[in-house]
Image (cartoon, rainbow, N blue to C red):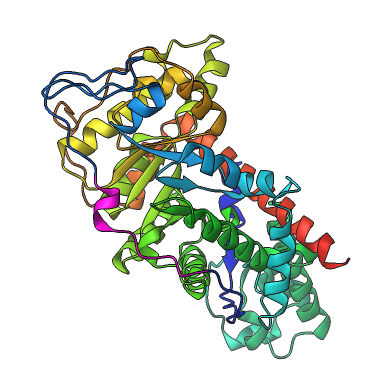
Amino acid sequence: MATTLRGAQLHQTQGRLGRTGATLRPVAPLPRQAQAHTKPSRGGATSATTAGRVGSAGSAATFANQLEALRSMSTVVADTGEMALVKKYRPQDCTTNPSLTLKAVQNPEYAHHLMDALAQSNGAGGGVSSGRKFAATATTNSSSSSSSSSSNNNNNNNNNNNNNNNNNNNNNNNNNNNNNNNNNNNNNNNNNNNNNNNNDNNNNDNNKFAGVADVLAVNIGVELLNVVPGRVSTEVDAHLSFDTAATVDKALRIIDLYAARGVDPSRLYIKIASSWEGIEACRQLQRRGISTNMTLLFSFAQAAACADAGASLISPFVGRIMDWHKAKEGRDFAPEEDPGVKSVRDIYNYYKTHAYPTIVMAASFRNIGEIRQLAGCDNITIAPALLAELEGCTEPLARMLSPDSASSAVPKLSGITREKFDASHGSDQMAVDKLAQGIEAFASDQRKLEAMLAELSQK
């Protein structure tokens, strides 16, 4: 899967939507203190009790349930795009992705967002057509020119040479026209084959609705920002995960769409898959002052490269790591031995030991036992079902992670190159598998969203 995705690199043409005139109230910049993390005292763990009150002077605070206790240690983020659940659990931030957006708009209460996005895009003068454009991957470019004497070559040989050399068309002026036509046909067929590797191609009418899907994601993000005090993460189209320039273009488009709705960039994270190309896009965006959330992170190599690139935040996936090991080993894992928990713990300790400012946001949980093991992580993004479980639990909650007690024997890794990244990340089969699967899953749900929009546009 990873080879297929990289082989069919995708390119996003930049298509800016015009201002639609449809506005909500401006969303104010995020106050600096709103995202600050209170540094815990060294040593002792905190706990939740059933008392639901604050202790007297000098004593530890007590909380009604584990969710409230967790809020005192970590920034709690809601992993949903559904407004009613955000209002219920009052998170600091919200994260979204194509899968969560697809789930949200399938709820009749949120279906209006689909029509709103279509209406805004149609009224923006070309927004609907500002979708993906696939770039062919050149697989053989062994030479850039050929001698003019090749005009006397056998026609069949010229045709074969044309398949490997795009410039032969200019040099072989005396070739039979049929050979040139065959060359063009062969190139077109190669392009189609590359595009079909991702079950998508230039002739797929749904591609033009990628731009509308951007509007849809931003509309939902704006609504969430009117409820949460912090930030919203909006994800770049997963089809662009192996194209740095296209990812940067898409991120800037998302920022522009939010700006048109009165949203300051300080309220946003741009979510990007943690491929090498995505990490390079992160580096460029951070230099422009755009905060990134590096998602689909499964290996220490990804985490080290993201920190080196200056990412604002990373989202290491706990549950998906555990899923892979569970399938591989055929057994369940207790929370304290969970491979996903161990991965996040190692990353957290490395970041704090070397004073990286990048926020570690643990994500993708399968049970609240995993969450408990990571209490104290900078941020924790949690699905509504698990938020409900934590809210219903009144047992003590111990702090497991703290900047003061963090320690890592791994030296600081700086100046990470593509070669070093590929060698390190590529040696972790779990991470290679899960990154490819994650990108394909998000891309699949993106296509489903675009198909829904395409169908609605015909009504």
The tally of labels here is 0
Prevalent SS, magenta region: loop
Which residue sits at x=82%, y=62%?
Answer: 456
Instruction: Assign the N terminus to one quadrant of the image.
Output: top right
Drawn side of residue 46 relative to residue 229, left or right: left
User: Which residue shows up at 25% across the image and 57% down it?
Assistant: 32
Could you tell me residue 237's position as x and y percent?
58, 57
- 28 drawn magenta: yes
Q: Nearer the viewer, residue 10 or 448?
A: 448
In x, y percent, where is residue 416?
Answer: 27, 49
- Position in image of residue 85 (x %, y %): 57, 40
Closer to the camera in the image, 392 or 358: 392
Where residue 407 appears, x then y in whole percent? 16, 27
Q: Is residue 98 left or right of residue 60?
A: right
Closer-to-camera residue (435/423): 435
Is 251 within the magenta? Answer: no
Report the quarter where the C terminus lies: bottom right
Residue at the far right in the pictured view: 459
Left or right of 44 in this view: 337: right
Asked if 77 appears above or below 183 in the picture, the reply is above
Kindly tell me whether residue 204 is visible in this rendering: no
Residue 155 seen: yes
Q: Which residues are magenta?
A: 25-36
